[in-house]
């Protein structure tokens, strides 16, 4: 295949061609980070899935290795699907993954390194006493997959396996003393009605105070919390093209890191033409907000090593209808941090009581960046063409509720991202989430966006609300892409500080490996 470079990313994780999906078994072992991921070695659509394998010393520069796990045994002959790594005592990594057997039953297998002293753990062995866990009689064997990292608690190892019973999505819980013989707990760890099959569950502890992350084995007990900021459906890690995410504990920096898959928003035929599909998001550190009500995320510090040419914009006033260009950086491949300061919140629009049951995305589709407001919309116009025929706005809009409370909406709106005709199969959603900030105190809100040709990953209010969009501009490409700050609210907004960097490309070694 000829690989179309047009919308390929510059600093996100991407193999040279073909389809990728879920990040699998991320781990740190003896100074090396490992990332496995679901990969089709034969094409740009899902299928023929193997576990591709890459290693890195810094989570930024990667070296590609041959696939670590691929169908070869009766217990995985029809598929090697998602799974996780656990580091067993004695510093021994082990992988649990879902195999599809000869009957296409989803079963849970293990794999171990062939040679623990190979620093890259290139070769993995799938012993013949597999599988470890099979679906029980009452389970649907086509909806039983994606084992988690195991945690040690009360003399037992525990894992979750995703599943579904009738209309309930669930996280089945298993325990084992020796990691080989597993017993299903009577009750799933958690389940919820009408949520579909729970793919790629993840279960991890976060420290209650401070940013220090703890290892999974420190967990005590699990009580689901339904008081989270985002209501009944619970909190979300990301409101956009972000799926099958997985965390791992990095003992070298005492932090928990989250990887996610950013799928394409174009059609399968487009992917075939491009010769590739899917990218991994920039790894994010996750921790708990001080009020313990939500998970906060921030791109790993190491990303900053890719920052090149830098520009600042400070104390820039932006009046209603104005947009101000951030010049002299590569706007199609950039990292931007900005803090907006608001004079007053008095002009905030009323939050229509009829919207009470709508999700943020629907509200954003009703109040897009070109709909003037009171306080906001203000923010960034990313991947913008010179005359704004194309742009992906990432912005805030402040509402006032009947109870006189402020409600902050954050949007990353793909509607205007591409001039490709609307009858083409291109998903252009107005992704959005509410931001749990109290603006009344200092009337400031921050935004960081990682822009990379066809992906915009944004972090509102220091990482409280995160949104990833996949977009396919036709004009705003490469050097013809621009970046602006804008305000479309009657209340003037000040860009208190803004720093933008051109981003360099990391080293991707052995990317020409033919699998
Ligand atoms: N992708 C894998 C499954 C998982 C799904 C197959 C989630 O194991 O449930 O490629 O994207």
Image (cartoon, rainbow, N blue to C red):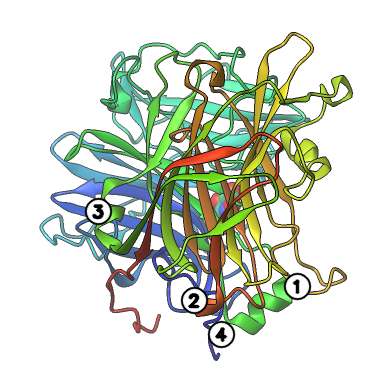
Give the class, few, some or many, for how many residues have Cα within 10 Å of label 1's Cα (few <14, many ≥20): some
Tell me how far mark 3 sits from mark 1, CA to CA: 40 Å
Residue linked to disc 4: 4
Residue 378: x %, y % from top left? 62, 43
Label placed on residue 41: 2
Taking the image as shown, residue 283 lies to the left or right of residue 378, namely left
Instruction: For the C terminus, give its image quadrant.
Output: bottom left
Distance from Cα at disc 2 to Cα at disc 4: 17 Å
Circles 4 and 1, Cβ within 8 Å, touching? The answer is no
Q: Which residue is mark 1?
A: 419
> What's the distance in space between the residues labelled 4 and 1, CA to CA?
19 Å
Say which of marks 3 and 4 sits in front: 4
Mark-to-mark CA distance, 2 and 1: 32 Å
Q: Which mark is residue 33?
A: 3
- Find the distance from the CA under tag 3 to the CA under tag 4: 29 Å
Residue 512 x %, y %: 35, 84
The reply to whether callout 3 and callout 2 are in contact (CB within 8 Å) is no
Q: Secondary structure at mark 1?
A: loop
Q: Nearer the viewer, mark 2 or mark 1?
A: 1
Classed neighbour count for the residue bearing mark 3: other residues with Cα under 10 Å, few (<14), some (14–19), many (≥20): some
């Amino acid at each position: 295949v000829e690989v179309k470079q047009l919308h390929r990313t510059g600093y996100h994780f991407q193999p040279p061609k073909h389809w990728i999906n879920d990040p699998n078994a991320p781990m740190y072992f003896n100074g090396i980070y490992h990332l496995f991921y679901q990969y089709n070695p034969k094409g740009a659509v899902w299928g023929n899935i193997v576990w591709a394998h890459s290693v890195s010393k810094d989570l930024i520069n990667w070296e590609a290795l041959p696939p670590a796990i691929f169908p070869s045994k009766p217990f995985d002959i029809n598929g090697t699907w998602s799974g996780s790594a656990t580091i067993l005592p004695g510093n021994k990594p082990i992988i649990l993954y879902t195999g599809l057997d000869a009957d296409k039953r989803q079963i849970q297998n293990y794999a171990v390194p062939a040679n623990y002293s190979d620093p890259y753990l290139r070769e993995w062995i799938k012993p013949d006493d597999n599988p470890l866990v099979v679906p029980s009689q009452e389970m649907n064997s086509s909806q039983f997959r994606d084992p988690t990292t195991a945690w040690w608690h009360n003399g037992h190892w525990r894992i979750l396996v995703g599943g579904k019973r009738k209309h309930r999505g669930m996280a089945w819980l298993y325990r084992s003393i020796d990691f080989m013989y597993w017993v299903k707990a009577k009750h799933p760890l958690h389940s919820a009605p009408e949520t579909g099959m729970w793919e790629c569950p993840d279960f991890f502890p976060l420290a209650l105070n401070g940013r220090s992350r703890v290892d999974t084995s420190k967990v005590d007990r699990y009580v689901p919390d339904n008081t989270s900021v985002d209501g009944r459906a619970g909190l979300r890690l990301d409101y956009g093209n972000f799926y099958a995410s997985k965390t791992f504990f990095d003992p070298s920096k005492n932090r928990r890191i989250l990887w996610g898959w950013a799928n394409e928003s174009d059609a399968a035929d487009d992917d075939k033409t491009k010769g590739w599909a899917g990218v991994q998001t920039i790894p994010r550190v996750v921790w708990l907000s001080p009020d313990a009500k939500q998970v906060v995320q921030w791109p790993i510090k190491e990303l900053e090593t890719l920052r090149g040419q830098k520009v600042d914009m400070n104390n820039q006033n932006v009046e209603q209808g104005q947009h101000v260009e951030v010049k002299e950086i590569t706007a199609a491949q950039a990292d931007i941090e900005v803090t907006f300061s608001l004079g007053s919140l008095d002009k905030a629009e009323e939050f229509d009581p009829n919207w009470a049951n709508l999700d943020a995305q629907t509200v954003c589709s009703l109040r897009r960046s070109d709909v003037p407001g009171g306080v906001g919309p203000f923010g960034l116009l990313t991947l913008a063409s010179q005359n704004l025929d194309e742009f992906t706005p990432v912005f805030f809009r402040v509402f006032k509720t009947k109870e006189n409370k402020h409600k902050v909406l954050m949007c990353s709106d793909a509607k205007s991202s591409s001039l490709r005709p609307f009858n083409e199969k291109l998903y252009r959603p107005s992704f959005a989430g509410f931001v749990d900030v109290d603006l009344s105190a200092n009337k400031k809100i921050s935004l960081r966006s990682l822009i990379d040709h066809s992906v915009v990953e944004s972090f509102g209010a220091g990482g409280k609300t995160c949104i990833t969009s996949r977009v396919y501009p036709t004009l705003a490409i490469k050097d013809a892409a621009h970046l602006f700050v804008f305000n479309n609210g009657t209340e003037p907004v000040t860009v208190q500080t803004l720093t933008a960097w051109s981003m360099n490309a990391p080293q991707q070694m052995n990317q020409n490996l033919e699998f």
